[in-house]
Image: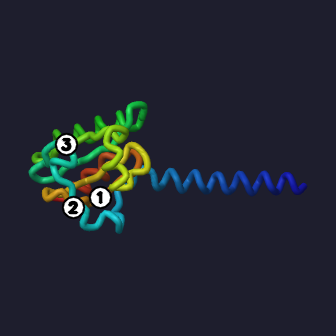
Amino acid sequence: MTGLMVCVVVLAVAGAFGLLHTRRNGRLKVRGRDGGVRLDAAELGAELGPRATLVQFSSAFCQPCRATRRTLAEIAGMVEGVAHVEIDAEARLELVRTLQILRTPTVLVLDADGRIVRRASGQPRKADVIAALGEAV
């Protein structure tokens, strides 16, 4: 009977963790540590968009990174003045450490001045990115 109770508790905890992870994955949010952080063209290796910039940190073998790339490129093509910059996380480890990027894909929404407005860890939804751009513009 004790083994059955342990099994039920483990399954409940694993299920709760799975639900929490699913709800948080790809959500665009503001982090306190991002307040005031500003990125410029030299740090990114590309020009900032006149209105906003979508910065994506990716890695070579990341399947969600490919889908995120397509989504962000589509949004950048739809919204005038928005640029999409993709950064290889493995090639830019110093920037990754500075910005505390923990997984790929990570998407940063920057305003015209290069300030981080929103951050998503995981594949963001298209509607969430468009809403975050509304705040950045």
Q: Are there few (<14), some (14-19), or many (20+) residues within 10 Å of tag 1?
A: many
At 86% from the left and 52% from the top, the residue drawn is 3
Q: Quadrant of residue 45?
A: top left
Quadrant where the N terminus sits is: bottom right
Disc 1 secondary structure class = strand
The Cα–Cα distance between marks 2 and 3, rounded to whole angstroms, is 24 Å
Q: Which mark is residue 118?
A: 1
Q: Position of residue 109 (x, y in %)?
A: 25, 53
* Contact between labelled residues 3 and 2, with CB atoms less than 8 Å apart: no
Amino acid type of the residue that numbered disc 1 sits on in the rendered structure? Arg
Q: Which mark is residue 85?
A: none
Residue 128 percent location from the top left of the image: 31, 53
In this figure, which residue is indicated by the disc labeled 3?
45
Q: Which badge, 2 or 3, is on the more N-terminal residue?
A: 3
Vertical relation: 42 (above or below) 59: below
Residue 18's spot in the image, x, y percent? 58, 51
Q: How many numbered marks does the figure carry?
A: 3
Q: Extreme right residue here?
A: 1
Distance in Å between CA atoms under marks 1 and 2:
9 Å
* Looking at the image, residue 30 lies above or below residue 102: below
Asked if the residue under mark 2 is in contact with the one under mark 1, i.e. CB atoms within 8 Å, the reply is yes
Identity, as a three-letter code, of the amino acid under mark 3 = Gly
Q: Disc 2 designates what residue?
A: 135
> Alpha-carbon distance for marks 3 and 1?
20 Å
Give the left or right position of residue 7, taking residue 17 as reference: right
